[in-house]
């Protein structure tokens, strides 16, 4: 990859980072400013921290808000993703605390999943509706190039990294029962968390490259030789994982270039089924950030 494609041109590469439990701010950024964004879908979790890491522009958001004020089901995922898109992000790294559902994935390991299973029950999972219907493909929900960079950076930091696997997202905020945990394991999932859905779906609708750095804190409740997951054990490993996450981000972000060659940034090219003549004006206006390149609004002359 040439230096020009790595962002050495006049336009800087802009990366969004969503920090999960324990990661409420990002170190090492220069020219930092905090930006409050209002969206047609409500307020994001917090203000966005905008700064630079080398030649790259970085937009950081604490998913749960600084101070961890929002439970997984109370997060406004649409506003969070819309805000990143409106600030110019083209790629999004999701940092997430997870439980391991496999023996070989030990607490403090990193998992870069390539699939998701949405087991949530009451979250709004699309920007579409209210008169405009869109169906994006979710067959490959993770940007392979971005996932590869995260895996490479993790290895360089000395972490144990597992590439691939399925992240099951449950509603929460309670941890699983032992029966649920055993069933999820039979389904073949790799890790369990509460926040990557509908985040990944919305990132695809917003045509953003998306990848998750999942940081294992525990073995959920299925492992007979380990204590059942508790807030105390999670927090203890969270503190260790945060240091790892920061080190990986510092190595990964400078390697992210543009443009994406995996189709992430053209996900809406054939996704909208509604006849443009039938678009409700109000809905079309709300979705202009997403649809403007495909369905430009014609301005009256004069």
Image (cartoon, rainbow, N blue to C red):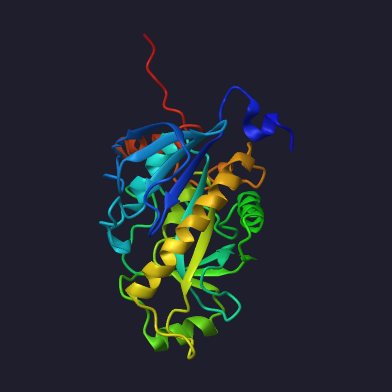
Q: Residue furthest right?
A: 1
Comparing 167 with 221, the one in front is 221
Pick the quarter of the image with the C terminus.
top left
Q: Residue furthest top?
A: 302
Tell whether 299 sits left or right of 55: left
Q: Is residue 103 above or below residue 247?
A: below
Q: How many marks?
A: 0
Is any part of residue 242 visible from this angle?
yes
Image coordinates for residue 131, horizontal then vertical, percent: 35, 46
Image coordinates for residue 136, horizontal then vertical, percent: 52, 52
Q: Is residue 8 above or below residue 210?
A: above
Is any part of residue 273 visible from this angle?
no
Image coordinates for residue 13, horizontal then vertical, percent: 56, 33
- Residue under the image location 39 percent in, 66 percent down: 194
Q: Residue furthest bottom?
A: 224
Pick the quarter of the image with the N terminus.
top right
Tell whether 222 sits left or right of 48: right
Comparing 157 with 187, the one in front is 157
Comparing 301 with 7, the one in front is 7
Comparing 135 with 1, the one in front is 1
Q: Is residue 3 above or below residue 104?
A: above
Image coordinates for residue 262, horizontal then vertical, percent: 65, 47
Tell whether 217 sits left or right of 285: right
Tell whether 202 sits left or right of 253: left
């Amino acid at each position: 990859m040439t230096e020009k494609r790595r962002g050495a041109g006049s336009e800087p590469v802009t990366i969004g980072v969503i920090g999960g439990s324990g990661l409420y701010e990002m170190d090492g950024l220069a020219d930092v400013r905090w930006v409050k964004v209002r969206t047609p879908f409500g307020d994001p979790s917090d203000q966005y921290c905008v700064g630079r890491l080398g030649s790259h522009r970085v937009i950081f958001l604490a998913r749960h808000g600084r101070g961890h004020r929002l439970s997984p089901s109370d997060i406004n995922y649409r506003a969070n993703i819309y805000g990143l898109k409106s600030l110019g992000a083209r790629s999004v790294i999701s940092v997430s605390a997870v439980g391991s559902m496999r023996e070989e994935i030990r607490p403090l390991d990193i998992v870069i999943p390539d699939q998701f299973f949405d087991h949530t029950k009451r979250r709004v999972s699309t920007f579409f509706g209210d008169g405009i219907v869109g169906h994006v493909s979710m067959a490959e929900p993770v940007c392979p190039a971005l996932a590869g960079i995260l895996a490479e950076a993790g290895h360089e930091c000395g972490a144990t990294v597992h590439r691939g696997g399925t992240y099951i997202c449950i509603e929460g905020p309670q941890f699983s029962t032992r029966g649920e945990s055993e069933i999820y394991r039979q389904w073949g999932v790799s890790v369990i968390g509460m926040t990557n859905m509908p985040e990944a779906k919305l990132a695809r609708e917003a045509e953003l490259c998306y990848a998750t750095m999942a940081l294992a804190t525990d073995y959920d409740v299925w492992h007979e030789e380990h204590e059942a997951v508790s807030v105390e054990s999670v927090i203890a490993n969270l503190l260790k994982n945060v240091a790892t996450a920061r080190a990986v981000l510092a190595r990964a972000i400078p390697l992210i270039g543009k443009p994406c060659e995996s189709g992430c940034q053209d996900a809406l090219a054939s996704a909208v089924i509604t006849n443009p003549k039938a678009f409700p004006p109000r809905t079309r206006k709300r979705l202009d950030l997403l649809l403007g390149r495909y369905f430009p609004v014609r301005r009256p002359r004069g």
